[in-house]
Image (tube, helix red, strand yellow):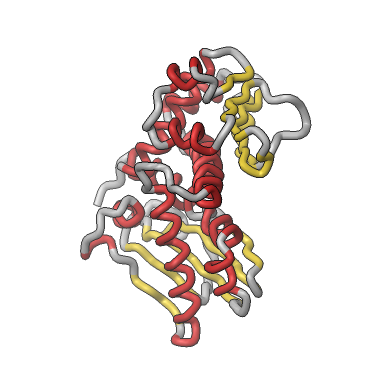
Amino acid sequence: MAITKDDLYSSKIFLNAALPLAKVIAGDIPKLGDKFKKTHAVIQVSALDPDSPEGKVGTHFVINSGEWLVHAGRLTRNPHIELEFQSIPALNKFFKGQMGPDCIPKFHLKVKYVPDLISFVMVLLRMSKLLGASEAPEDEATKKLMVKCFFYLVTSGISQLNKAGHEEIHQWALQSPDRVYAIGVDGHPDVSAYIRIKAGNSKAGRGIYKRSLPFFNMRFPTFDDALGILLGTADMLDSLKAGKLILDGAPEFAGQIGNFMFAVADYAKG
């Protein structure tokens, strides 16, 4: 099966930006995180890829007594648990919710790791529910987690698309001096993220960028205000007029960053 550029971009989003959110979700939802208190396992999600030097691409997690290490975009040779897709398009279809017999992964594990596999799949299902939502949840804790995950996803996703050679985003990065673009919710420093761009290079980070003031900062007064933009249920201009979106920096950068955010969403949702 021929792999298109869009297939490649989607796989970069899923493997290197979305899957690492599993650690965030397990950490923020005790009911899920507690299931890994006795886990000692290396869990890998991969897709066969004949164009890759190793014959596959993937991301793996090292979990020890509830502590997670994420190795985004990196393979390990001997995982205890592996979800292996037959191709990159199959992986993309699975994470976009386009279920079918051609996109179900093979599970490689010993019987003793079955409980850990079940716990991991439960985290993936919660991640899918959060990222696939079309409207804001009712409780504040879930709103906070959803906004945090979206912030991490869009900043990491933009960086991944740049590294993968996405024409528009990479051209923007090539022409950029050293600048930091940030996004966050007022009063919640843990619900913030940023991306640093310099001469074609990019790096996403979580939390507040502390080395200097960001070149451009997109802020929201509340989680609901943020979800309005993130879920596409609110108009950016209307939100600006109503004070539900605050821009620290030139307004033209809001449209540019907004377009890149929606590009990440398009590759993630199809």
Q: State the residue at coordinates (51%, 21%).
A: 172
Left/right placement of residue 87 relative to residue 64 reads left
Residue at the far bottom in the pictured view: 111
Q: State the residue at coordinates (51%, 13%).
A: 252
Q: State the residue at coordinates (66%, 44%).
A: 190
Picture coordinates of residue 178, whole percent (x, y): 67, 23
Picture coordinates of residue 151, whole percent (x, y): 54, 39
Residue at the far left in the pictured view: 101
Asked whether residue 16 appears in the rendered view, the answer is: no
User: Exactly how many numbered labels are in the figure?
Assistant: 0
Looking at the image, is 125 positioned above or below residue 197?
below
Residue 176 figure quarter: top right
Left/right placement of residue 216 relative to residue 52 reads right
Between residues 187 and 231, which one lies in front from this camera angle?
187
Q: State the residue at coordinates (44%, 61%).
A: 124
Looking at the image, is 88 positioned above or below residue 183?
below
Picture coordinates of residue 138, whole percent (x, y): 45, 48
**The C terminus: image quadrant:** top left
Left/right placement of residue 104 relative to residue 212 reads left
Looking at the image, is 96 positioned above or below residue 113?
above
Asked whether residue 225 appears in the rendered view, the answer is: yes
Residue at the far front in the pictured view: 138
Between residues 217 and 195, which one lies in front from this camera angle?
217
